[in-house]
Image (tube, rainbow, N blue to C red):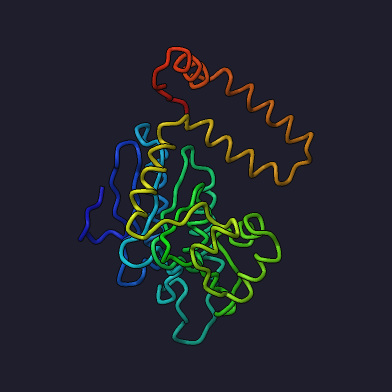
Amino acid sequence: MSEPGSASALMIRDEGAVRLITLNRPAALNAFTAAMLAELRQALADAAEDAGVKAVLITGEGRAFSAGQDLADPMVAPDPTGKPRDISRQLDEYYIPLALQLRAMPIPTVAAVNGVAAGAGANLALGCDIVLAGEGASFIQAFAKIGLIPDCGGTWLLPRLVGRAKALQLALLGDKLKAAEAVSLGLIARAVPDAELMSEALATAQKLAAMPSRALAETRRLIDQAMTLDFEDALRVEALTQGELGFAHDYSEGVRAFMEKRAPEFKDR
């Protein structure tokens, strides 16, 4: 676990069964570097492998969640000789694995967006299962302003969250979207007063942590998969998955706990 004031680009601590990961480059608005992205991937892997961790909460230190890619990072900074950089290398090595890893976590993920979430920072947050934001937070798809397209899953996430018309509006214009409007569009789950953001986000993560992890992860998987299936195929995938879960510990434990009027002790991953 890293502590405030360390050289780490992350601060990591546990709040009960919740692993709190705080992006920790506040002077740079928590903009991503290659080293920071590698550290974040390792932190998620550690959380996924720790049986005592039942949910992950991601937020940013200081006045921003993340301003996206740090354009001064050597991986993407302009070459002094004028030779173009191969930005796809950054995506292949860091952003694609990170986005896939986040989507495949065996435990639920929550983002607490404080301040600005721009570019890849916005799409990292939107890749989490539940997104809460402070009322002063904002989301910006800033890519077009520097001649790029939304990455870190942005082209997949945006139309699924808000529809094609609004996705194009956000991606093409790159305008700042305030938290309240993000809620009204269905981009995020909830906006709360800034002072209450972390307590509300932690309460949400702790609620998820007390629930059956495997069932939650399977719910996410099936909802994502259903977007490419017809209705009958979705029904059959539901039946197959429900059958598998029915043989698992958590179903039996959940039923017994309900009948015995006690809190369940879920264990499955």
75 vs 114: above or below: below
Whole-percent x, y for residue 218 in the image: 57, 34
Q: Residue at x 57, y 17 (%)?
A: 247
Q: Is residue 63 left or right of residue 98?
A: left
Q: Residue furthest left?
A: 5
Q: Is residue 214 above or below residue 91?
A: above
Closer to the camera in the image, 54 or 134: 134
8 vs 104, left or right, is left
Image position, residue 148 (x, y; %): 59, 74
- 144 and 93: which one is in front? 144
Q: Is 88 or 260 nearer to us in this picture?
A: 260
* Snapshot quadrant of residue 30: bottom left
Residue at figure coordinates x 62%, y 55% from the top left: 161
| Callout count | 0
Q: Picture quarter containing residue 169?
A: bottom right
Q: Is residue 219 above or below residue 249?
A: below
- Choose between 122 and 9: the one closer to the eye: 122
Viewer can see residue 93: no
Asked whether, in this view, residue 220 is left or right of residue 17, the answer is: right
Please tell me which residue is depicted at 47% across the width and 74% down the height of the picture. Answer: 76
What residue appears at the point 54 percent right and 61 percent down from the top-left corner?
Answer: 182
**Residue 38 seen in the figure:** yes
Q: Position of residue 97 (x, y in %)?
A: 51, 53
Residue 269 place in picture, x, y as percent: 47, 30
